[in-house]
Image (spheres, rainbow, N blue to C red):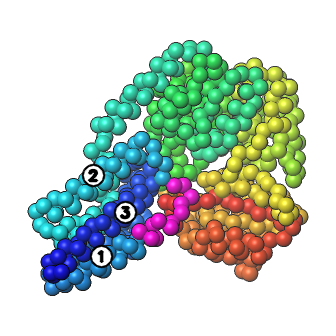
Amino acid sequence: MSITDATDLIACVVLILWLPAMFLAFKRDLMMFQQNSYRPDRYARWAKSTGESSTVARCCYLFSFFLICVGRVPFVVSAPIAAFVLVWNIVVMARRHYKKPLVFTPRARRIMGVTAALSIVAVAVAFAFLSLRGACAVAMAVLFVSQLFLLAANWLLKPVERTITKHYYDEAEAILASMPDLKIIGITGSYGKTSTKHYLHRILSEHFDTLMTPGSFNTTLGVVRTVREYLKPYNEVFIVEMGAKQPGDIKEICDLVKPSVGIITAVGEQHLESFKSIENVQRTKFELVDALPAGGLAVLNNDFPYVANRAVNNVKSLRYAVATPDGADFMVKDIEYGRRGTGFTIIGPDGFELTLSTALVGECNISNLVAAVIVALHLGVPSEKIRYAVGKIEQVEHRLNMKHTPGGLTIIDDAFNSNPDGSRMALDVLRRMTPGKRIVITPGMIELGEKQYELNRRLGDTIGRSADIAVIVGQYNREALVEGITASGFPDGNLHAVDTFADAQKLLMSIARSGDTVLYENDLPDTFK
């Protein structure tokens, strides 16, 4: 075999290896793009904050690119190095597991297809106008800047996505217009909206044929999909969870569904990275109330100052509170927590009282139940049906969900999307669990903008005053949490820092005993390290 033939063979091997490496790299890029809501600005901020653009893998691709391009390095030397880099990354990426893997929706498949096509065209052009060696160099460069190819594909698909989105939106709008008697309830808040949605659905289902947006379908497109795929002509009530990452998001959903009842569960310091200020959070959440018709009803959680201080003049409003009853229409008394649940009494206008029992625990869950009860009363659900439904409500997974293991451990699962107020309430529940050791496992809170360090330090202080053992997971908030815990006078020997949740589980197995209580507070997504 001649040198030329050997060189060509090596180049072909590199290009063949490049294909699976390209697919795995683009799959991971797309997964993160999907977790950032397909928004290039958020994706770019995430890549910058995590150093994703300069990982070891990308640096190896760049090194291989330069080796191939440098004329003094024989291709028979640089190509095997490139092949090794490709094989190594293929193995690493193929073995990697993610908490929230890529969902191959039609949009994701379109982006993946166009991204791959752009990459293959780039390599093919290099081969046509340069050589096999040039094609190999471009192939390695493509992997180094794979994020740019992904963003280019997304930009090229914009007209297609707009057309598809409009078609689906118009279809959902027509379905809703065909059901004029449908009662539509909007629920939003910095936190608590998903739990409130589930509780309200369970209560109303005792009296109405009720549909709620499934899972975390709380964006405009998620609501559109729910209407098109799940809403039936016989449904009487439609409960719509409304999420927001920026001003205007809630209004956009309201313009589609036109709710007559709106619940605001909280206005707090969450998603400050995108909202910048709590005042912007308040304005966005109250887009729901502003959209209600003259005969509508706003149900507002006065436990939050930025809900309580916002006047409502366009519709009737009913305010509720658990911790700060002043100015509230509905309040709670006689709360009794136990290992199997909670008993409490709701009091309201005109001497109204309703005593309830639930398997749920925590002030935040009681608050969410009150909001659901108020709406149920407004819609005419009898008190006995409300009492029965509340007693049958199941805990929502990862939202202050209490479980008991065969080994005698009590697990408080609050792993979904921790926030300042929710974490405080979860730790209050942990503090009340007196038998055995109280153990908290947490990576801290995210998306808090300029207050990230301050609020996590405050969380650390609360942990120090509520738990007996603290396990800090990961590097992202470690310094702030440790500083807060230490400042509370927490014993050094009871504070542990580990890199992953797997490490935390191993540690837990060695320190936990029957009768102990373990609180899992938050679980960072794959976009955080």
| Label at residue 117 | 2
Residue 489 visible somewhere in the drawing = no
Amino acid type, residue under disc 2 in the picture: Ala
- Secondary structure at badge 1 equals helix
Residue 90 lies, with reference to residue 219, above or below; the image says below
- Secondary structure at badge 2 equals helix
Q: Per the image, is 96 magenta?
A: yes
Amino acid type, residue under disc 1 in the picture: Ala
Q: Splitting the image into 4 quarters, where does residue 328 fall?
A: top right
In the image, what residue occupies the spot 66% across and 36% down?
197
Left or right relative to 362: residue 159: left
Residue 460 visible somewhere in the drawing = yes
Give the position of the N terminus as an image quadrant.
bottom left
Residue 250 % position (x, y): 50, 35
Q: Earlier in the sequence, mark 1 or mark 2?
A: 1
In the image, what residue occupies the spot 73% across and 27% down?
205
> Looking at this view, is 88 or 483 the one in front?
88
Range of the magenta residues?
90-101
Q: Which residue is mark 3?
A: 20
| Label at residue 82 | 1
